[in-house]
Structures are given as C-alpha cells and as structure tokens.
Image (cartoon, coloured by chain):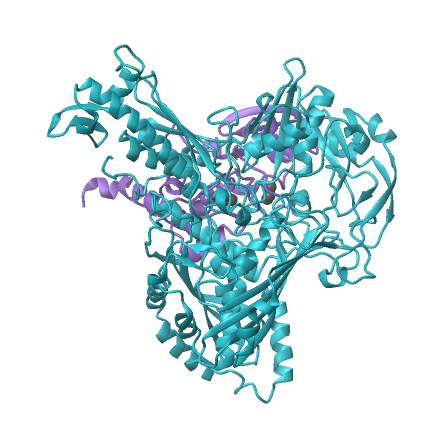
Chain colours: A cyan, B purple
Amino acid sequence: MAVTQLIGAKIHRREDPRLVSGHGRYIDDLNRPGQVYATFVRSPYAHAKIQKIDLTEAKAAAGVRAVYTAKDFQGQVAGTHPTVAAFAPEKKTVPDRFPIASGEAAYQGEIVAVVLADTKSAADDAANLVQVDYDVLPAVGDLEKALEPNSPKAHTDLADNLGWDMTLVPWEATDSAFGSAEVVVKERILQQRLAPTPMETRGVLAEYDTFDKRLTIWMSNQNPHFIRLFVGGALSLPESSVRVISQDVGGGFGSKISPYPEDYLVPAMARMGGRPVKWIETRTESIQNTTHGRGQIFDVEVAAKKDGTLLGMRLTQYLDLGAYHGTFGAFQACACVMAGGAYHWQGISARTVGVLTNKVPTDPYRGAGRPEATHLVERMLDRLAQEIGMDPIELRRKNFIQASEFPYTQNFGLVIDSGDYEKSLAKAMSIAGYDELRKRQADLRGKGRYLGIGVSTWIELCGFGPSALAGATAGVALVESAQVRVHPTGSVAVYTGTHSHGQGHETTFAQIVADTLGVPYEQVEIRHGDTNEGPSFGYGTYGSRSLAVGGMAIHRASQRVVDKAKKLAAHMLEAAEEDIVFDQGKFHVKGSPEKAKAMGEVAFAAYGAGLPEGMEHGLEAVAYFDPPNLVWPFGAHIAVVEVDPETGSVKFEKYVAVDDCGNVINPMVVEGQLHGGIVQGFSQALFEDVAYDEASGQLRTGTMLDYMVPTAVEIPDIQLDSTVTPTPVNDLGVKGIGEAGTIAASVAVINAITDAVSPFGITHVDMPASPDRLWKQIKEARGVSATSANGGGGAQA
Amino acid sequence: MKRKVALTVNGSRREDEVEPRLLLVHYLRDVAGLTGTHIGCDTSQCGACTVLVDGKAVKSCTLFAVQAQDAEVETIEGLATGDQLHPLQQAFWDNHGLQCGYCTPGFIMAGVYLLSQNPNPTDDEIRKGLEGNLCRCTGYVNIIKSVKDAAQKMGAAKGAGTPVAAGGE
Ligand code: FES
Ligand code: FES
C-alpha cells in the first residue's frame, strides 16, 4: 500500500470554488423547459374534517393549468407513507397516511389541494381561491393528556393516541439496584420540538417522459436511492425507469432523509399533466411541514450509593410522534439504549411510549436519540453530584467505563468498540483550567455573581449500520456501496451511495482514494447524488455514517482495483505476483524499485492487448461494505457561563471541546463539523423551540421571526482539541463526527446554567433556557427559598 | 401590468419588463439568471439574498425590482474575475468558512460591505456586521475567521500598493 500522504492532511475543499462564486446547483437553481409551478393548499387547522372543497374560482384563475384534490391522486399514487418497524412493541397503532388529506386533516399544514400554474405567482394567487369548508375538531397537543382515556383522538377513527408502547427492559430488572440504593434522584427532563431549519428549504422538480415512461426527479435530499425506491414504488414505476438527482444541497440535518408527501405528489403531477412540475418549499412551509426533531418527555430515576457509585436507572420516554409516524420514528428508541452513557450500571430499565398528536410528525434531526440520551444521563449525573455534594467530574471518573475494558458490552447488549474517556476529560479540564474555574466560581459567588461550569462526557454510537445490528438501526441494513473506475489514462471516477450536503465528501473521499490507489489527488473525482450513476443502490448520508461505512466501501473497492492491478503488473514485469511490491502508486519487483510500473501505466494496459491468460479487461471494482459493528466516538465538553439572576440572561465565558473520532481524514472538515454541531446544541439549550398553542394546535413559531436560529452575535468562541483512539471496527480506524457536537453540547450548557443557579436551590433547568424562562425560575426559587439562598447548594468544591 | 426597469447588474446595463410586485431577488434569479443569490426565508431574516445596491449591503428580498431603477447592483457572480476569486471568496475557501454553501454568497456580500466600511474590524465588529445573516452549518466560527483573514490580506495588499512603500522608505 502507498505511504499515507493525504489521509490526515488539511486539504482545502474542492467543492468550494463553485460555491463561493455563486455557481452551486441547488434545487431552486434548476428549471426544465415548459415547467409549471405547484402551490399546495394546506389545512389551517390542526385537526378538522374536510367538508367540501370548491375549486371553481381557482380553476378559472389566470395561468392555472390544473387544481387537484385527493381523489385525483387515487390510482396515481399507491400505498401509504413508509414507516420502518424497528421493534415489536406490546402495542402499536400506525395511522394510514396518504400524501394528501381526503376526509380529515390531522395537523396544521397537511396538504388538502394543489394548484399547478404557469408562474409561481399565478399558482400562489389561485391557491388562495381554493375554498375549503372545514369542520374544526378538537386538537391533541399535550402528551400526557393525550394518553388519558377521555382525550380527543388525533384521528377520529382511532381508539386511542398510543402510537406504541414498548418496554425494552422491565422495571423488575432493576429492583435489586434500587433496593440497595442509598440515594435516589428523580427528574423530568423535557426535549422541546426543534425545526431542523437547513438554510435551503426542501424542493422537488419532476419531469415525466410520456413515451419512454421515464421519470426524473431533482430534489434537495440526503438519500436519493431511498427516494427512488419509495416514490418509484408508489408510482408503480420500475427503479430502472426512475432517476433521482440531488445536486448541491443546502443542509439537511436529518430532515431530508425521509420521503415527504410533496415528493410523491410532484412527480405524480408531472405524469398526470405531461409537463415538468416544480415546487420549492417556503420557510413557513418548512417550519410547519418538514419533520421536527426531539419532542420528548423523559422521566428518569437514578439509584446510587452515597459515595457516588451508580447502581441503576429507570427511564420512560414519551415521544411526540405528531399526527403520523415518521419514517424513522422508531429510531428514537435509541434515546433509551444509549441512556447509560460512558458509565457502569448494574442495570437500566427503559420504556418508550409513542404518542400521536395533531402536530407535524417528528423524525431524526441531527443526533436523533443520542443527544437526548446524553442530555439525560449527563444531567442526572450532575443532579446526583449536587445531591450527594460531590464534584461532578469526580462522580464521572468514579463510574467511567475504563480504557482497558473495551470492547465493552453495555447494558442493552451493544458492544462499545473503543474509548478512553478519562483521557479526553483530563485534556478538556486542563485546557479549561477546571480547578481554577471552581475557585473563581466560589470567589464570584461571594460577590453575588453566578458563574456555572458544565461538563458533558458524551459518547455516541454511529456509522449506521451493520446488517447484523438492524435492530439498532430502525430495522434496516444500512450498508454502503462504492464503485471505483480507473480510466485508461489513469484518471479515476468514484461513485458513492452516500450524499454530501456540506460534509465535503468530494474532497475527503478523494483523499482516501488517492492514498489507496497511489494516484495524484487531482486525478480522483468523487460523484454522488445521481441514481443513474454507480452501483445499483446507495444508502445515503445521516447517522454519521458516510466515512465509517461509505468511506470504507470506497476503500474496499480501491483495494480490489489495486489487487487486480498488481496481478497485471506482475505480468508486465514478468514476475510472480507474490514478488510485486506496491509503493507510492507504483508496482515493482521486490529489490528492484528502479523498474516500476505506475498505476496509470497498468490502467492503460488493462484496456489493451496482451493481458495475462484468463484476465478480463478493465480496471474497476464495486464494493458493498457491511460494517462488523457500529463505531463509538466520545469526548469531553466543558461550558462556562455566567447567569445574571436579575435578567435571566446567560453569557458564555468559555467553551472547550475535546473530541475523539478515531483517525481523521481531514482535520479542517472535522473541526467544521464540530463547530456547526456544537452550535446546534447551544441553540437547543438556549434559543430554539417549536411552540404550538396547546388548545388549538396552531403553530406559534412559523417564521424565522418567531423561531430563533442564532446569529454570529449570540455564538461564543469555541476551543477545540482532540484525542485519537482509532476504532478496531474498520481498516481506516475512523468513526463519525457529523452529529457529535450536537450530541455533546446542549447538556454541557444546561449543566453550566444549572450549576450557576444552584445557590438558589435550583436542581434542574429545562430547554430552551431563554432569559424569560430562566428569570422566572430564579424568581420563583428565590421566593421559595429566600432564607436558604446562601446555603442551598453552594459551590461543589 | 408589467413595468419597465433599467439597472446595472455586475457592470452590465439591463432593461426588462417586470411585474411591479416582483422582488429584486426573484428578478436577479429568474430574469437575470443569476442564481448565486439565494432565498432562505420569507420574512427578511436570513440574509441569503444579500447583494450590494449602490455599494450598500441590501437583502434583495426586501426590495421590489422596480425600486432598483437606475441602481448599480452587484451580486456574488460579479466578485470574481475569471477564475480569480475575490479576497473574501478566497478567504472563505482557505478558512473553511462554508459547508453546504447556501448561506455563503449572502455572507460574502455582507462581508464585502462590512470591509468597505471598516477595513480592520475586531471579532465583535465582524459578528455585529454579519448579524443580518444566518448560517446553520458552520457555527459562524470559521466565517468570522474568514472575514478577518480577508481583512488582513486586503489591508496588506493595499499597503503594498501605496507610493510610500514603492518609494522604499
Ligand atoms: S431571503 Fe431571507 S433575508 Fe432575504
Ligand atoms: S454553510 Fe450551510 S448554511 Fe451556512
């Protein structure tokens, strides 16, 4: 193998020149001749019977080509929305979902009609002329009330609102842990709904060739092969007749994985009307209709000894499913199986309950279950530390799974591949100056200032996923494919089933190939996002899988190319294959490096005359990589904040993150992923909240004016560092880093805030810790414990 | 009823018949075919549509095309010369100031304006100067770094070109 030169190098991204110059190709930049524009008419109510739809005026409006309602799609779009069944719960109800509502709308924004017109503005105007008579029904909002027997139902034909109820490990399993406990702490931890808010909204452009019966769909998506599978299937078209293209994508964060109603309807309309149809989501449509993330209540109890030894945990997750199950909603069970974090436990009991409400469905959003798990376990450790008067770091150290124990089988039977939690923590503490910080905190408290220090020693499972572990990956085998083609003159085209929407794969994957094949980096081109190219199926990008699974498939396919090239080189050098050495992109006979054949020369020969007996022409290979295990990144984050109790405002003083994702292909890209991920964690901790009016189910945060995405002003500097613990799971030793920052950060911030306000007797702060909420909480706590304010917690020094 | 609008875009004079309600951003994208200016919201929060109008950074979704009558509009496509990137574009590339790239044209245009007003901004001044723009990918860390880097390089280039330096004093 060639000496590693590019793996690990800080290579500037090759996708950037087109993007910084305004030459990216995002969905709204694409147009087809003769296209018409779609505008959807959506239910303004969270729950309503559709009595009558009058299309007369809309159909007569200028520029209108067609107006459709549900009945027009009967026979055009078959089947219901896919949902993966990852587990067999005691109870499960999955409401049918057709991409357009007919009798009843079950969330605000559900599609009831659609207008096609020659211009976007004509379609918008006519959509306003569609008259729908609704009979408003009671809306289901609150998760606990939804489970009461007399609650209204999210769909009128349902017996109850219980989407599922599953006990992963029964309560009895932790009886002995709780029985021997010297201290038990309990908390209810809320995970607010979040709108993923990629800066580019969704969009679909579809064209149907009536005579060839071929459908082409351009869309902003993380997962084009899945779309081809689902949409082609629903439209009864063979996959070979459907092409899905996803070029530059302006961010996804999990919200562009699953198929959406518009993804079926736009292609169906292209076929029905014989003209290309384009639809671009507005921001309000995006916040209202693109799946939300999080949306849970966790009831958690932790049993421990007074010396800080953790014994057991019991947790119940109530997940707000929304009106329908998200395609990968079942994946949220992951919040339970990861609840043990980086620690030893005698036992963990867990139950997950999915609740149907009249809101838009929830589905994965950056981290998907793992931020929630980290948040709850790291929060509970601080809660316990406060209870027993122990430093939260000491408590963590006491219970860490030790570096010598890996591979370590955790409480839910998953095998943690590798780790060194102590190491990343020690590094973070030294960078942050932890001991100094505690002293400063005590000093400042004396002066009536409230500094807080929060720690998150997070772990993650990612790299979805091994076919053998389909249970942990929502029931689907999420392997990955790659094709490597070496052209006769030595240039290389590589096709991957993953999809890049900001991650920089065109650069980082080329680094892997250049090293493995020993060809110049500039000669390698990475292609993705077009189902007509490369292997027959790809699995897409999410779950921090692209490198650990997709990168490995590329690596494997490259190795196959090298293997064949080596045979051919042996023939060319008239030597036995065993005597051939591959070094720096050249083949030579052991001991005579001066007589070498470069990969390019071998490639040329592979397409010409004079091949060895029995060898086929060509130099290309396909590989599917099925990882033997998931990979487990980890790290330690320390947040330092100051809370002003008079205003409830939170000011960052410092944020230190030491992360370990194994070997690194391109450190610049890794740092970028961490910055962005961490800020999304901050944002959940402090700002973002999809708010519905509980009584009416009306969305109260439907624009960027109301839904707070932070600007550069709100975001502090972030100090990054790393440790490197390569995974034994794959040959590259790599893990994932796309979600790590988000998984780690929300709880570091919330732990810091809780620590800051602990002198007021506060033991838990929920998200978002916005100034108004925090101020109110401090005020209430002060009212209750005005006399004990000085003794109510003190510094945990 | 359509109305005539005449303006200069990236140095070229144009005249078009447009609907009075057409926003400048749609004019640039759909009429002038310059799709580097992006749309990220419908309430003028995100700044993805930022362009320069008579040298000032403007969210082009807040203006009707007809309001740009006789204006000099500069978009992201007007910054580079051939494949020679503008120093800010180069700095975003060098400092990994973008990931998905969707917000990037808006940030770069806002950055051009910021540096035209304040060639040597502090980190806080950069943050303030870019507060009309949202990025969901980068956490802003490398965007701030990029603008700072560009400021330094543009300052140095200017310094090198002054007659004092040429006089070799
Ligand atoms: S499109 Fe968001 S500010 Fe103009
Ligand atoms: S780089 Fe994706 S939004 Fe800024």
**A713 relative to A787, above or below:** above
**A532 relative to B127, above or below:** above
Name the residue: 53% across, 33% down: B72
Looking at the image, residue A650 sits to the left or right of residue A48; the answer is left
* Front residue of A755 and B71: A755
* Front residue of A219 and A581: A581
**A613 relative to A386, above or below:** above
Name the residue: 39% across, 50% down: A671
- Residue A675 point in image, percent of width and height: 44, 52
* Front residue of B28 and A602: A602
Examine the rendering and report whether any part of residue A168 can be seen.
yes
Q: In the picture, which quadrant includes the N terminus of chain A? A: top left
Examine the rendering and report whether any part of residue A700 can be seen.
no
Q: How many marks?
A: 0
Taking the view exactly as shown, the residue that stands out farthest to the top is: A609
- Residue A133 point in image, percent of width and height: 88, 42
**A37 relative to A689, above or below:** above
Q: In the picture, which quadrant includes the C terminus of chain A? A: bottom left
Name the residue: 53% across, 80% down: A183
Looking at the image, residue B43 sits to the left or right of residue A254; the answer is right
Looking at the image, residue B13 sits to the left or right of residue A393; the answer is right
Taking the view exactly as shown, the residue that stands out farthest to the bottom is: A787
- Residue A76 point in image, percent of width and height: 74, 26
* Front residue of A147 and A42: A147
Residue A258 placement: quadrant: top right
- Residue A544 point in image, percent of width and height: 47, 46
